Image (spheres, helix red, strand yellow):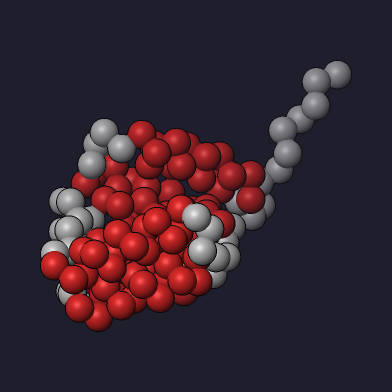
Amino acid sequence: MRAQRPSGAAAALAEQAYWLAEDGELGAALEMYRAALRRDPGNAGLMVDVGATLHRMGDAESALRSYDEALRAAPGLAVALLDKGAALYSLGMYAEAAGCCREALAADPGCREAGRLLADSKRRSRRRAPGRRAPARPR
């Protein structure tokens, strides 16, 4: 499933927000994305954009709420699942991140980014698993 594109005034606001974010003006971009979302409140793609901006601003927990909102609006939306996985990963929640990546790959089997994040999440999750012993050193 692909995210729906905003139309009309929401599309113009989203485009402005994109360029603000590209220029590093994340606070202004966030406000512009939120304004676009007010004009197109059910748009899961805009919800993902809000989440991605929050994540770039260092607020992964708020980003997760935005991704969850997007997934309620558009269940199985690959980009929302991938970005949610990235936010979970940044919070050190590797097993949960891997689960999101698996779902993203089920929705979009060609998503290389989800495959890479899944592999890294699994690697890190194994390292942090409680009760795991370090491998024996060769003598």
Q: In the figure, is residue 19 to the left or right of 38?
A: right
Depth check, front residue: 24 or 71: 24
Residue 51 seen anywhere in this rendered image of the structure? no
In the displayed image of the protein, which residue is found farthest to the right? 139
- Compared with 123, 59 (above or below) is below
Residue 66, located in which quarter of the rendered image?
bottom left
Q: In the figure, is residue 51 to the left or right of 23?
A: left
Residue 75 x, y percent position in the rendering: 19, 62
In the displayed image of the protein, which residue is found farthest to the bottom? 38
Residue 28 x, y percent position in the rendering: 46, 71
Residue 20, located in which quarter of the rendered image?
bottom left
Residue 106 x, y percent position in the rendering: 24, 44
Residue 40, located in which quarter of the rendered image?
bottom left
Residue 132 x, y percent position in the rendering: 66, 46
Q: In the figure, is residue 115 to the left or right of 103?
A: right
Depth check, front residue: 94 or 67: 67
Depth check, front residue: 99 or 117: 117
Residue beneath the point at 34% across and 62% down = 16
Residue beneath the point at 51% across and 45% down = 121
What is the tally of numbered marks visible in this picture?
Answer: 0
Residue 137 seen anywhere in this rendered image of the structure? yes
Q: Quadrant of the C terminus?
A: top right
Residue beneath the point at 29% across and 42% down = 105
Residue beneath the point at 16% across and 51% down = 1
Q: In the figure, is residue 2 to the left or right of 63?
A: left
- Compared with 107, 54 (above or below) is below
